[in-house]
Image: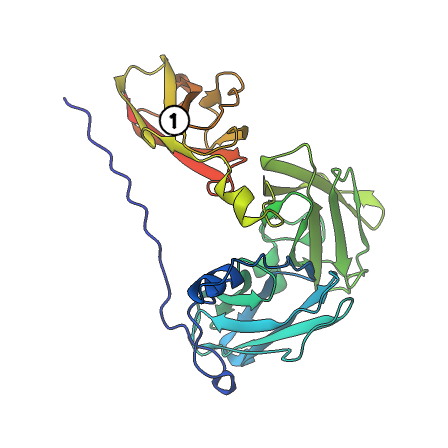
Amino acid sequence: MKMTFITFIAALALTTCGSRSANNGPVLEYVAPVQEMAASLDAEPVEEPAAVIIWDKTVHDFGDVSVTDGPLSCTFTLTNTGKEPIAIFEVVSSCGCTDVKWTREPILPGKTGTISATYKNEDGAMPFDKTLTVYVSGVKRPVILRLRGVVHEKKKSLSELYGAQKLGAFGLKARQLKTGTLKQGQSTSETVTVANLGKKPLSVTFAGVSPHLSLSVEPNPIPSGSTATLHYTVEADPSLYGKNLYTATPVLNGKKADASLEITTWTQENFGAITAGQRDNGPIPYFETSTFNYGIVQKGEKVDILFRYTNKGVESFHIFKADAESPALSPAGQPEDVGGGGKKGSVRFTLDTSLLEKGENVIMVSLTTNSPLRPLVNLFVAGEIR
């Protein structure tokens, strides 16, 4: 029996309704950077000053709501911590179901601006996850804000909503939480809704908190039979890249819970402050293939996996970390740095098939790198186990 050929097709799902609040004019599909506009006028390229902004959040989770709750509104706040004024050029909603307004005047250093969004909640009972694409002066890439939640036909009890993984009276939908991509020198924050399923107020603190992780609950204590918002923030650890796990154990009315919260985040290099020249001269890895097919092997065998690449950039290529989505695939040593100008390198792994089920298997491995153009490289290992 021949091995089934496995083909990978990368597809980008785009929501094309792309509308925004009617009072904001036509949708702006693309904002040209200063360098491109200067080139169009046959002028010398101009380095766009890098703005320094801090968001109070990039995700707003409405939690569980019902179709009878009507429109759902929230506000995102950004603070200009740089030395020059900034302006919000445009905010594009992924769907006509979300209206948006934003601060129109320049935001001076030390001052704040806001983006207010309203999800119309007219699509019926279903989960929703809407995006706002924000273009800010001095920021080379747009910022993505998210509005999400779950709409139910009828209201459910707190126990039904938050009792699946409760710790005593502390109600949770899940103990395993995630954050957005974290860049070195920055922090990322998320919120989830929690509940007090008990009959008396619940005071929540945390013990055994991982370095660079902070958590808070508001309101605290949580009134009996009520919900609260759990805020958690991860600050980048300069020594950590790729996928990392952070933990904290809830302490409920002075008593330590039996289990911990687990928060995963993905840390990448921060290329926001580099110049166009530095970006152009950075390392550029070209892999011979993105999929290593090891064919048909017997369960229990160990397979050597090898990906070859060429660094067609100028600077040396460095892999900070390799993360496989299965413990069956592990790096075979630390990859060496490879100089630019067409020099070749490789990444090696060992596959322990005893840890996999029989049949066809596909494992993705993600490389976190120092390439401004390819900060994250996804590779695949595929084959059949008998």
Q: How is the image coloured?
A: rainbow
Where's residue 223, x and y in %?
78, 65
In the rendered image, the vertical position of residue 148 relative to residue 363, given as above or below: below
In the figure, is residue 23 to the left or right of 165?
A: left
In the rendered image, the vertical position of residue 383 relative to residue 178, given as above or below: above
Out of 103 and 154, give the one closest to the viewer.
103
Q: Tell me the quarter of the image containing the N terminus.
A: top left
Residue sitting at the far bottom: 23
**Which residue occupies 15% across, 23% down?**
2
Mark 1, secondary structure of its residue: strand
**Which residue occupies 53% across, 49% down?**
276
In the rendered image, the vertical position of residue 184 relative to residue 199, given as above or below: above
Out of 210 and 370, give the one closest to the viewer.
370
Where's residue 322, x and y in %?
51, 29
In the figure, is residue 12 to the left or right of 85?
A: left
- Residue 146 visible: yes
Where's residue 297, x and y in %?
28, 16
Q: How many marks?
A: 1
**Which residue occupies 76% across, 64% down?**
224
Q: Where is mark 1, residue-wise?
A: 309
Which amino acid type corresponds to the residue marked 1 in the rendered image? Tyr
